[in-house]
Amino acid sequence: MRNRGSWVTLGTAAAVVAAVLGLGFIVQRTTLRAPSQATLAAIRSATWLERYRLVDSTITLDDGRVLRGRCLQDWVVQGGRRRRGAVLRLDDGYTLLAVPPHTLSATGGTAATQAMSPLVLMELAGCPRVLARRLQTLAQERRGLTLGRDTLAFSLKGTSLTLRLAPHTGAPVGVALVSPTVRGASRIRFTPVTTQLRQLLGVSSR
């Protein structure tokens, strides 16, 4: 009788364990749902942006101006200290240095370019870290992303952005932007970083 009772007890315990595991699987499937296609596209885009720190761009603004730019995310030496930052140069002579948390300085360029928001210029120029961080945040939160045919739309601080994606790789190849003051679009191209390019952009590796 004892043996029979032991088998019954073991059988009951096994049933309880199986029920708990089954419930856990259901809860996991419910709470940890599969990522959407928009989330996966954002992750792929962010990966491309993180992989290449230098982006060349051709920017067309709604007023007809065309600007060519180059944005590098790299280590910047300030006051003897190395910090992560971005250097954006446009062909009208405009140079923007952005080093979190406090440095944001712009020099040169036309009056029209100087009047534009530095963040808008960095977005249009495809500055990698700016776009990658926003995409990573939205992908993690699984919200705020709209995937179309080879396009990925999202917003950043009141600005509506649409990335144009390469059909086969998902790499960002263009940016369209609508803000309260500016509309524009750009073609972007990832470029390998070389010592010569870093020197041209005024970035020191020391």
Image (cartoon, rainbow, N blue to C red):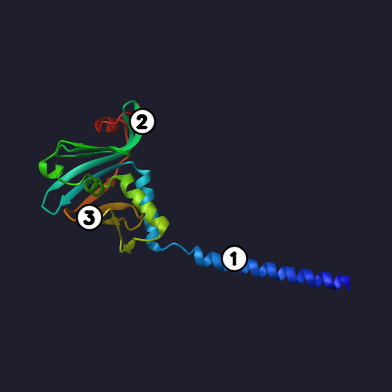
* Of callouts 2 and 3, the N-terminal one: 2
In three-dimensional space, the C-alpha distance between marks 1 and 2, rounded to whole angstroms, equals 48 Å
| Residue on which the image places disc 3 | 177
Type of amino acid at the residue the image marks with label 1? Gly
In three-dimensional space, the C-alpha distance between marks 3 and 1, rounded to whole angstroms, equals 44 Å
* Of callouts 1 and 2, the N-terminal one: 1
Label 1 Cα crowd, 10 Å radius (few <14 / some 14-19 / many 20+)? few
Residue visible at 38% across and 44% down in the picture:
51
* 32 relative to 7 in the view: left or right: left
Front-lying residue, 167 or 53? 53
In this picture, is 43 found above or below 16?
Answer: above
Residue visible at 21% across and 51% down in the picture:
186
Residue visible at 10% across and 42% down in the picture:
111
Front-lying residue, 185 or 23? 23
- Classify mark 2: helix, strand or loop: strand
In the rendered structure, find residue 24 and report the number of the disc placed on it.
1
Label 2 Cα crowd, 10 Å radius (few <14 / some 14-19 / many 20+)? some
- Classify mark 1: helix, strand or loop: helix
Query: Where residue 185 sits: x, y (%)?
Result: 20, 53
Residues at circles 1 and 2 in contact by the CB criterion of under 8 Å: no
Query: Where residue 104 sits: x, y (%)?
Result: 25, 38
Q: Nearer the viewer, mark 3 or mark 1?
A: 1
